[in-house]
Image (cartoon, grey):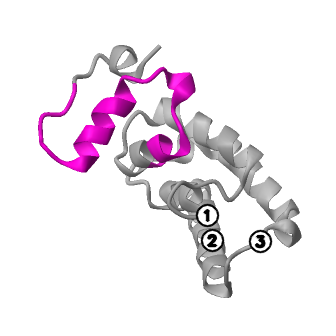
Amino acid sequence: MKLIEKYNTSKGEFDSELVKHWNKAICKEISDLDVFDICMFIRQNSFLDTVIPIAVNMLMDNPLSGFLYEGELVRSIAICPGDIKPFSSSINNVLILIRSKENSLFFEDEEDKKDFYSNIESIKLRITQ
C-alpha cells in the first residue's frame, strides 16, 4: 500500500524540491520508504502512525540512521512537531538499545556525539512528560 492511498491524500502542487520529493515518496510502497522519506514525514508531522513504527525499526537496526548525517532520524523524532507519546513504549525500547550500545557508537567528532545525546534527552523528556 502507498501513503497516498492509505490516507486518501493528493500530491502537493507547490513547485519546490520538498514538494517534489514529497510527491514521489507518497507514491512509493510503504515498505519501500527510505530513511530520507521517513525523516521528511516526521519533520512535517505527517503520517506519524505509519512512519514512527518504521523509524523505530530503522533505529533498532542502526541507532545512527540518517540520510544527510548520522543521527538524522533521532533528530527528526526529537524535533517532530506532533505528539510522539502514543509511540513512547517503542521509542523507549530504542532509547534503551542506544544506551546499551553507547560505547560502540562512533561519531565524527565530539560535537556530533553531544548533539546526538542531546536529541536523545529531548526525546526522553517528550515521551515521559
**Left or right placement of residue 6 versus residue 85 in this view:** left
Does residue 67 sit above or below 6 in this rendering? below
Point out residue 107 in the picture as x, y percentages from the top left corner.
Answer: 71, 74
Does residue 25 sit above or below 18 in this rendering? above
124 and 107: which is toward the camera: 107
Q: Nearer the viewer, mark 2 or mark 1?
A: 1
**Left or right placement of residue 107 versus residue 111 in this view:** right
**Residue at left 64%, top 54%?**
65
3 and 49: which is toward the camera: 3
**Left or right placement of residue 19 versus residue 116 in this view:** left
Point out residue 23 in the picture as x, y percentages from the top left corner.
Answer: 28, 32
* Labels 3 & 1 near each other (Cβ < 8 A): no
Which kind of residue does numbered mark 2 sit on?
Answer: Phe
**Circle on res. 106:** 3
Point out residue 110 in the picture as x, y percentages from the top left corner.
Answer: 68, 86
**Circle on res. 70:** 1
Which residue, given by chain and number where applicable, does mark 2 sit on? Answer: 116
Q: Which residues are magenta?
A: 11-39
Distance from the alpha carbon under mark 3 to that under mark 1: 10 Å
Q: How many numbered marks have been drawn onto this rendered protein structure?
A: 3
Which kind of residue does numbered mark 1 sit on?
Answer: Glu
Which kind of residue does numbered mark 3 sit on?
Answer: Phe
**Left or right placement of residue 49 versus residue 3 in this view:** right
Distance from the alpha carbon under mark 2 to that under mark 3: 11 Å
Q: Secondary structure at mark 1?
A: loop
